[in-house]
Amino acid sequence: MREGTGVDAANRLTAGWAQTLDGRPTVLSGAGAYPLLALLAAHAGGAARSELAAVAPTGLPLVDSPTTRLALGVWSAADLPLTDSWLAAVPEPLRRRLTGDPATDQRTLDEWAAERTDGLIPAVPVQVGPTDLLVLVSALLVRTGWAEPFRRRPFRPTVGAWRGRDVDGLHQVTDEVSRLRVSATPAGPLSLLTVPGEADVDVVLALAEPDRPAREVVPAAIAAWAGDAGLPVPAGPGVGTRTVTATDDRPQVHVWTVPFRVTADHDLLEHPEVFGLGSAVGTPGDHFPGISAQPLYVSQARQSATAVFGEAGFCAAAVTAMAARAGAAPRASVTKEVTTVEVTPPFCFLAVHRATGLVLFAGWVTEPGPQQP
């Protein structure tokens, strides 16, 4: 990871967010929420500034990528006075006006989200009301094919919770044995399998020992991905070896996994402290003097996300939106040895930008699903 660029901070945000997971299938993107938090942090004051800056101290580097698109949009009410520093930080092409008619504004925002995610996210996750003065939205889209495609084949797992069940599997054979490694983590040993994308985004599948919860496995996978393997490969969950007859002695890894599609809607204000929003959503005061002379508080902060993993590739999208109103609001409540690796539910996945180390998406899979990226 690249210290000082915002990548490390964004990855910490994703890991911290993952600590709140309850084990249901999900996908989330700290990278999608981070640019909005960093923008608010730069224009906040008092306790809100301290809390936001602790989570998002600096902006993210621009990702120049054929596979990844990040778009930002800022809508403000016509009668909201905006500071010169805010206008300088938000380029004119990103600025739009709220009409004050909720139906019209909602339709405009929904169309913006759908267009920038190729229809994967058809609507923004917030409901625009007549009292909303400011709406910040980010849209993150990742779409990549595999460097080595999978083949669809029936599969009966030999280990894990799905042992002995017939599933619609994905199979791949590779000579790149370094793609599989095992790390010792606070969540126990993790088997980390990197599935290279054809351009600059890879997907990491992380398998833990049975019964390890998502809130432990996903943060451990993010930390382990950037570390060194600490265990011999055959010691990892889902990993085994067998001897076969072959024409050469080059080692191989046979990869078995399942296609999946996961979607999720997140209310960031269920855990405002994770996002540095504790003071900005609940205590009276002028939280964002760098935005406007009108006191503002964050009234909504939500994300909708989806991810699809199939034989041909991977795609994922997230739309994060935050709305602000005048005044203050009550605090939200916190709630030829051939090595075989079988990655079957439940397991974690990460989508990682190869050049920067930015974790674009993280998720938890409990069931196979349709696979049309």
Image: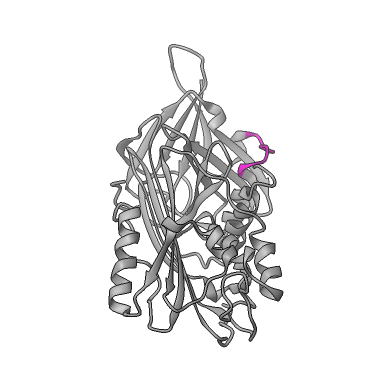
Tell me where residue 177 sits by quadrant. Answer: top right
Looking at the rendering, the stretch of residues picked out in magenta corresponds to 225-232
Give the residue drawn at x 65%, y 49%: 8
Give the position of the N terminus as an image quadrant.
top right
Give the residue drawn at x 28%, y 47%: 372
Farthest-out residue, front: 84
Chief secondary structure of the magenta portion: loop
User: Does the magenta portion include 52?
Assistant: no
Q: Is residue 211 above or below residue 326?
A: above
Tell me where residue 147 sits by quadrant. Answer: top left
Q: Relative to the observer, which residue lies in front, 321 or 83?
A: 83
Residue 2 rendering spot, x and y as whole percentages: 66, 42
Residue 244 rendering spot, x and y as whole percentages: 45, 22
Farthest-out residue, top: 247
Residue 20 rendering spot, x and y as whole percentages: 57, 67
Give the residue drawn at x 42%, y 28%: 173
For the image shown, how many numbered marks are present on the structure?
0
Q: In the picture provided, is 243 more to the left or to the right than 99?
A: right
Q: Relative to the observer, which residue lies in front, 174 or 68?
A: 68
Q: In the picture provided, is 3 more to the left or to the right than 195?
A: right
Residue 225 rendering spot, x and y as whole percentages: 60, 43
Q: Is residue 102 above or below residue 226?
A: below
Give the residue drawn at x 63%, y 50%: 6
Q: Relative to the observer, which residue lies in front, 133 or 362?
A: 133
